[in-house]
Amino acid sequence: MVNNGDETSGNPEPCVVGVDFGTLSGRAVVVRVRDGAELASAEHAYRHAVVDRELPDGTRLPPDWALQVPSDYLEVLRHAVPEALTAAGVRPGQVIGIGTDFTACTVLPVLADGTPLCELPEYAARPHAYVKLWRHHAAQGQADRINALAVERKEPWLERYGGKISSEWEFAKALQVLEEDPEVYRRMERWVEAADWIVWRLCGAYVRNACTAGYKGQYQDGTYPSRTYLGALNPGFAGFVTDKLEHPIGQLGDAAGVLTAEAAAWTGLPEGIAVCVGNVDAHVTAPAAGAVEPGQMVAIMGTSTCHVMSSDQHGVVPGMCGVVDGGILPGLWGYEAGQSGVGDIFAWSVRTGFPAGYAERAAAAGQDPHEYLTGLAAGQKVGEHGLIALDWHSGNRSVLVDHELSGVIVGQTLSTRPEDVYRALLEATAFGTRTIIEAFEQSGVPVDELIIAGGLTKNALLMQIYADVTRRPLSIIGSAQGPALGAAMHAAVAVGAYPDIRAAAHAMGKVQRHVYQPDPDRAVAYDRLYAEYRLLHDYFGRGANDVMHRLRRIRAAAL
């Protein structure tokens, strides 16, 4: 058992709990307030995972849908939090606050009391009544219209999003509900970010967090898009903000309320402790990785990658998911960019291109498929496989903001092997990150340091490729649970243990500086491959060849 007491006084030290709700599971971590020591963690997988083919009752879903079941999130509170407490050897009375973070934009329709519509029997077979996961991309048509009308009307908020908003965000997804299932739209009384819904369940109070409001809800300078603009999109959408969305906004690191008796019973935590305002997984990770100064970019790499950075420079950066004043740290502009598929792409490669012979050899070596392919790929020289790939298997979030784009692999021959494809996909995601960094710097927003967080930091080959491709030393977060640690740090601020998140970051954050250094010779070789990547990127992504969109339409017609 871990000894969490103060050795000089014998008194137990205060702790906070952070809960990170990811794409496939939720993770809870118990953190000591004094120094950020992670005493234990526990994970609970969502029973329904990602609902992208059919609803729990068997109702089939169209292409590009990605839903979730909200009761899965509550199961994380019932299982992961008590398990983490037990593993840490921490008594419930030591815990003084809880913070949470969520993937975004993950959003759901609810009644005024927070009941999800999918839990009403009459809507159990209605897809639009469920949680729309961040990677639900079926609202691309609505997003295109939102963008076109905003350009036509010269809407001032559009430049804060690099000129385009995404099909992943609140307004596009809500407009899709209205236009495809108006009864569900009429019945919903609140359109709620899951980040806020889980806090609502914990403390009984609905508080809309400033992070998702700014980055995913087009809330800028104290206002949302106007009723006139929304009505021009669809007359039935005119009252969306006032009727379904608008709500008091809580600032990051503030307390939303206190833990209810019901939530205390779920978690094993004391009733009445502080519940922090919700936040986004990527954004809470920045202070957890010690990134509290301008120009420190954090790439949180998992199924997708979010690139977040604070800056004292305000620029119009193409394809940003948002630029929000104080969106990550008070007093600085918070930028968010991202890649919609990273770990998901590597998983696809293994799932569809790992022959039986490879599986046998991997098992004999005691390796999983990713470890086995990485080992083979690590023995190659840059360019040896003769391939170049585009990392758009889940669309492009930044800088093109088009989720109807798709993946490409060029150069395959009858000699191409699974490890060749695997390495080309690793490199493609690094090229995508370099494209994002260059967009920042070309817009007058300098990137001074690149810090990597997330589960993919365990792949040393991938990290070295990123250093070589970006020509930058990589720093690595010193935590395997960056988002959960960041959520816990915000909880420490909410209870007053630290005056602000910067102070909490200095005491509780963890980073290993410059772990991977770029190799000059490999960097030169990657420059040549990156030039080819950019040719394909612009050819397929900027309108020279619209084949990806045409194929989408052909597929949709066939289905």
Image (cartoon, rainbow, N blue to C red):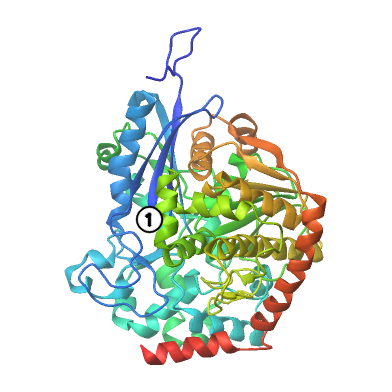
Residue 84: x %, y % from top left: 36, 33
Badge 1 is on which residue? 197
Does residue 266 sit above or below 369 in this rendering? above
Q: Is residue 120 visible?
A: yes
Q: Is residue 493 above or below residue 169?
A: above
Could you tell me how many numbered marks the image carries? 1
Position of residue 215 relative to residue 60, above or below, is above
Quadrant occupied by the C terminus: bottom left
- Give the side of residue 401 with respect to residue 15, left or right: right
Q: Nearer the viewer, residue 77 or 465?
A: 465
**What secondary structure is found at the residue carrying circle 1?**
helix
Visible residue check, residue 221:
no
Q: Residue 226 in the image: x percent, y percent?
A: 56, 77
Q: Quadrant of residue 469?
A: bottom right
Q: Nearer the viewer, residue 471 or 180?
A: 471
The amino acid on which the numbered mark 1 sits, given as a three-letter code, is Trp
Residue occupying image coordinates x 62% and y 51%: 378
Q: Residue at x 34, y 23 (%)?
A: 91
